[in-house]
Amino acid sequence: MDTPAPDLGPAAKAAVLSDALHYMRRYAGRTVVVKYGGHAMGGSDTFARDVVQLQQVGIDPIVVHGGGPQIGRMLKRLGIESRFVDGLRVTDAATMEVVEMVLAGTINKQLVAAINAEGGCAIGVTGKDGRLIEAQKVVRKPDLGFVGEPKTVNAALLDGFKKSAMIPVIAPIGVGALGETYNINADTVAGAVAAAIKAARLLLLTDVAGVLDDNKKLVPEIDAAEARRMIAAGTISGGMIPKVETCLEAVDGGVEAAVIVDGRVRHAILLELFTEGAGTLIRAG
Amino acid sequence: MDTPAPDLGPAAKAAVLSDALHYMRRYAGRTVVVKYGGHAMGGSDTFARDVVQLQQVGIDPIVVHGGGPQIGRMLKRLGIESRFVDGLRVTDAATMEVVEMVLAGTINKQLVAAINAEGGCAIGVTGKDGRLIEAQKVVRKPDLGFVGEPKTVNAALLDGFKKSAMIPVIAPIGVGALGETYNINADTVAGAVAAAIKAARLLLLTDVAGVLDDNKKLVPEIDAAEARRMIAAGTISGGMIPKVETCLEAVDGGVEAAVIVDGRVRHAILLELFTEGAGTLIRAG
Amino acid sequence: MDTPAPDLGPAAKAAVLSDALHYMRRYAGRTVVVKYGGHAMGGSDTFARDVVQLQQVGIDPIVVHGGGPQIGRMLKRLGIESRFVDGLRVTDAATMEVVEMVLAGTINKQLVAAINAEGGCAIGVTGKDGRLIEAQKVVRKPDLGFVGEPKTVNAALLDGFKKSAMIPVIAPIGVGALGETYNINADTVAGAVAAAIKAARLLLLTDVAGVLDDNKKLVPEIDAAEARRMIAAGTISGGMIPKVETCLEAVDGGVEAAVIVDGRVRHAILLELFTEGAGTLIRAG
Amino acid sequence: MDTPAPDLGPAAKAAVLSDALHYMRRYAGRTVVVKYGGHAMGGSDTFARDVVQLQQVGIDPIVVHGGGPQIGRMLKRLGIESRFVDGLRVTDAATMEVVEMVLAGTINKQLVAAINAEGGCAIGVTGKDGRLIEAQKVVRKPDLGFVGEPKTVNAALLDGFKKSAMIPVIAPIGVGALGETYNINADTVAGAVAAAIKAARLLLLTDVAGVLDDNKKLVPEIDAAEARRMIAAGTISGGMIPKVETCLEAVDGGVEAAVIVDGRVRHAILLELFTEGAGTLIRAG
Amino acid sequence: MDTPAPDLGPAAKAAVLSDALHYMRRYAGRTVVVKYGGHAMGGSDTFARDVVQLQQVGIDPIVVHGGGPQIGRMLKRLGIESRFVDGLRVTDAATMEVVEMVLAGTINKQLVAAINAEGGCAIGVTGKDGRLIEAQKVVRKPDLGFVGEPKTVNAALLDGFKKSAMIPVIAPIGVGALGETYNINADTVAGAVAAAIKAARLLLLTDVAGVLDDNKKLVPEIDAAEARRMIAAGTISGGMIPKVETCLEAVDGGVEAAVIVDGRVRHAILLELFTEGAGTLIRAG
Amino acid sequence: MDTPAPDLGPAAKAAVLSDALHYMRRYAGRTVVVKYGGHAMGGSDTFARDVVQLQQVGIDPIVVHGGGPQIGRMLKRLGIESRFVDGLRVTDAATMEVVEMVLAGTINKQLVAAINAEGGCAIGVTGKDGRLIEAQKVVRKPDLGFVGEPKTVNAALLDGFKKSAMIPVIAPIGVGALGETYNINADTVAGAVAAAIKAARLLLLTDVAGVLDDNKKLVPEIDAAEARRMIAAGTISGGMIPKVETCLEAVDGGVEAAVIVDGRVRHAILLELFTEGAGTLIRAG
């Protein structure tokens, strides 16, 4: 376990503990969906341990992961050219095969192994397993190929994992009505999963601090209406827009709150859930 | 909830949290018996809240209380003379009636009300309720009257409370084979209860820091053999001897560990259970 | 067990038995609330055994007790003056402390011990335990101090006791919204408890035969409308009025029937429940 | 329900009730096997109601019936000659067919209908249903044809009926290893069923008072050794011998006690079980 | 087990198997009611084994049987004259006694024994057992005596048998409101039972191939409207009319489909359920 | 569903059905492990449907797959050279990464999707998920790199899948004590899984008919001793030796029987389980 900071007196520790117990009670028996991002992944972080500890205090975690950089590297090795439209990868059949292979066969299993090494019981799945995510093609011009979006999430399957105390680790791949394979944005999958099970929290781990206001100060909490205003006003811009929109869809879909969290901070998940919070929390409203 | 110390950074909090989760897992689903002492009681302390929070994270608390000072005051008001032999109150029938009345009718209900005000579901009992504690007379010269010691503890009853998520608050009174009422030392009752249910921990909340070594420094942890040596050597002396002996009987009886904790510290129970510890822990050995 | 009357032939016994089984079936699995009065209490009566036998044939008893005389004696010993308004004890803080101490610490535990000596598993509680009875102040002129009336009864708690086959023995004390303690009339508590759980029967054990008609003959059964007429006509008068009103509130609140029974008769509870009845039964109507 | 004897005072009734509750507790959740004899059957008796009332207070009844007289009448109508050896009917194939038809098709269904008319849920069966009684031929000279004795009783089947609150009514017919049908003595079947399920009581309802001593006085209770002495001494003789032997086999087989009861007395079953007894009780010893 | 036809190649077998599994899935956990007719009964047929095998693959069978010829023979032996009106037996009290005796005491037990010899756990019942079939008199001129029709079927009882994995074998006898016994047509009982439990299938085993069209060719499947047209047109005539009407009532009552099957074919039940069908299936429509 | 062979008469079908039901009963509620081989895979076969149908009749399938040819192709595309020693692929770190990616990310998901398209609920896993297969290095000269063998199989995990009616589809990859990834022979994994759960059957689907005797005739069944004699005598030789040895280890480990089946035959699994068999069955002995 971590070495506690040596200079913390009992009074300070006691205050942290008492608050943490208060928050834990709120989440007991509920589910938290965590998107573990491509960029936030890797190295010596505390992500896997945090996930296992959540479960140990009675909160059920579900993990969704991305994998952009690794996919790009494998495509390159295989001599398959990558093309992007508005930040979305154009996914032809040959690309799709590689995307699935890398996400389901490499990254998913690394994450599963890391969580299990901490004492968890993670099961890695894609949207094909148990038809977890039925998807449909994203229709737009120019055509993106096998890029999809979730149509239905099999909540009963997730409930089966929960009953057996298994931690689902989900690669963002969906299956179409005719059996075709779709590449889906990982944030979108995390949001759809969270909405399908009315999760207590959706946590999007990223590599920024959260939503910033016009003075570049972190905004700790906003409601949906305010978030929409900030997008309209341009305060929220660039890559933050789709993240916030995923959060808005989740809270519209019944998730209690969605949080954009800085995944680079050690124990980011614990800090968000068991203290007065970290990052930017978005509520319905 | 407590105001967290304002100057604690996220890294420090995160370290405390991660450690606490590690400890919580160890106690999940298990029972902790807490003796809440006459002298440690009262005022604005955090005892009741701590007890409720234990239960909220899946640990089942059982509380045993004393009541020396209040008994003395009521005896005085009623003009009944108190006599002590070796620190034990000589308890004739008239005294016994007052002891029971004050413990079961006044102190027990105060503690119950305090715990319930924090959101718990405490049920105050004595050894008569459900024949929880069958007792026998302590036989010694000079005779002490209705001073008893536990013979059997009705563990099934405590299990019934646990199943209904009720927190038992026990006044240290036993019932004899012929229905007679006995006054029992509260530490002894706590130890017997802890042994009967093979508790994970017995916490004796007192008004000292714990066991001190020859240099008056707090001893964080000792095994039973070492504790016996320290008594023989006189390092442990005076009122600390019966406390340590209660701990030794508990660990001999199957309790995982017994701890003498300073009840004057805020959130003493949380600090003991969810950090590297407080007070002096005594293990079998 | 009782010595059966030696001159009863098999035919007479058989008739009693067959009828009794018929009645038992009606109450199987249901709950009967018994108010055991201050005056009816004590001595060599069969109350405790009857309560245990009810449970043994599948009927769940709940006992509510009073304690007027004993409270008066203790107040006198402590030099606290008793004042009554319309038969209600004016209860200042000092008096309240004594009332609680005697009811919860002395009488309640005597009754618990008596029931357990017959093989039951009684648990003595007040309205504070598990917040069983939340109370509010009785507002009237002149002010009565801490005299209260039940506002809510925690039926889930009573259900928890039932599931663990524990017999609740309730002292008539309530807890206010701010944690203050209230002295409540025991009949009133019994009625409120019976209504909260829709009991099959509320039995008020008293020291009279029941309701008498104008010719001083016992009335075996009346409906609510008739009872109200008898109060208006003055046939029911004096101390019988509040008892009948408690019965009326209980049947209005969903209790199947309430009965004023002569607690001085041996096995009064069994006679009331398992023969064509004893005392005066009051039904809705 | 029965009209209670009008001259019974409350004290007498109360004594009967208190005793009855005491006995009921002893049998709660247990099974009582009742042999309802050919001669004791019929008319306006209270047998069916008693059986239903047993179940209503938590005792599980199993009924075994005979049918000698009715079988004889049908054989006569069909012109089939009856032959007896030592009181046992010689049973050829044609006779067996009639025995089964009358027992299973007529008497069994009459008894089932009578019990159900009192509110029970009786299911009439023979040893063929669910292979309840596997039988073997009684081998003796002269040959008795299809006269059998129980080899195994399917206790799991009876347990299935108990779980569905069905009252089994058993016609004394067994099935052989090759599917052949056997005529078995009803007392013998009752004894074997009682032993197979370790019944609390086996009641043989007959048309005599019970076992008489040398002075023709009823013997209320004997142990097995004494019963064997009384047979050897000739005090027990004639048709009482096989009845007592059935009782001895039952108590040897694990039945708590077997009782020969006078079935002509109204509510004989209730009197035997819920008072100090009727008839002659035989215990192991 | 049957000797498989030696000349079937693996491909043919595999096709039969795959289809059968497909059909089995449709019936898994559901109930099939089979009327086993008087004329279809007896000899070396495969009926009992088929019934047991249904249960072994998770389908719950209920059997209803008739018994016309055997009843006629016994009436003749007893010198009771048989009278018929429109094919219905006029049933006076003496006749009713014989009908019940033969159906419940002889035929029912033969069928039970046959099923149990194949490893089943059959329980033979009539409408009296557990008040399975409450009946009312069929009122018509001339009067038919104790000829009845089902008024209510005790579906809860059948559910109790199902939970204990018992196979009910039902003799077509009903009980009236006053306890009187009624003779009911076995097809009618089967239809009423199937409707009461919303069976997946009602199979009427007969000694004809099924419904024939105007060219005397077997009609494999019709809906209710078409069946009614064929009756009106005279294509369905004679003894086939009541059979088809029983089927129509069953499907109107909620049975998925009713089938008239040729019971003379070996394994007729298996062929009907687990291949593309046999006989004539009638659906709602 | 398959078109049934048109020339099969009802008698032939009935015989196949009756036999099949007999076999189904033997396997009800039990587990069958099927190794679906690299060469047997693909095309329009009936494998996925057979697996789903097994589950639908109450048998729990577990699938283990290989993937030799596809791995070879991907290695070639990536320019990684394949080296074999005694038919075993030398697996360095770069190769291991590709093996895992292809097995877990491509083939596993194809098989999962095929089973789910037939209505099943397949979950694809490797030995890393839930630490299903803990492995150790195969130590031999020359060194094979990351080639492993199963050390422990997590049977509790498989039980969890079974309870949720999920069909595990296992890629033959193990995880070492230090988290390293191992490539394991798929037959070996299937055998170890079957032994860990005491499967009813291990089916190795191959592209040969089974074990042939000296006259090249298929041997339908042998015991373990005979199998060992045939290996020693050279009758079993070449690639058949490791297959038979896997079978022998499985039956030694508690599997009821292991069968080498020709996976090229349509519905091979159904034929093996539900007829008198196909391929070569090996029993303990």
Image (cartoon, coloured by chain):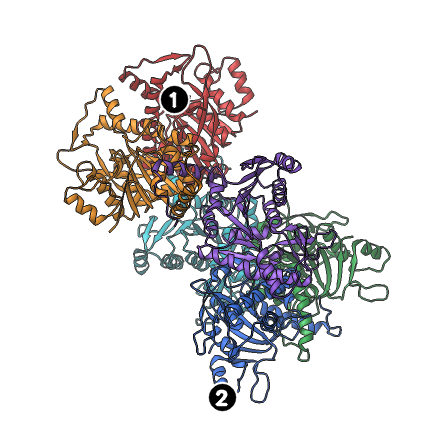
Chain colours: A cyan, B red, C orange, D purple, E blue, F green
Identify which residue, D281 or B2, lies in the foreground. D281
Instruction: Classify B157 as above or below A199.
Output: above
**Quadrant that contains the N terminus of chain C:** top left
Identify which residue, B219 or A280, lies in the foreground. B219
Give the mark count: 2
Q: Label 2's element?
A: loop
Instruction: Classify C179 as above or below F98.
Output: above
Which residue is outermost to the left? C141
Which residue is outermost to the bottom? E215
Q: Is residue C70 left or right of residue A84?
A: left
> Where residue A182 sits in the image (x, y, percent)?
51, 65
Chain bearing tag 2 is: E
Quarter of the image for residue D143 reads bottom right
Identify which residue, F164 or C69, lies in the foreground. C69
Quarter of the image for residue B84 reads top left
Identify residue for label 2. E233
Mark 2 neighbour class, 10 Å CA radius: few under 14, some 14 to 19, many 20 or more: few
Q: Which mark is residue B207?
A: 1
Q: What residue is shown at x 76% (from left), y 48% (from top)?
A: F140
> Where residue E83 sits in the image (x, y, percent)?
53, 77
Res E118 seen here: no
Q: Which mark is residue C227?
A: none
Q: Is residue C49 left or right of residue F5?
A: left
Which residue is outermost to the front? D215
Res E187 seen here: yes
Identify which residue, D91 or C133, lies in the foreground. D91
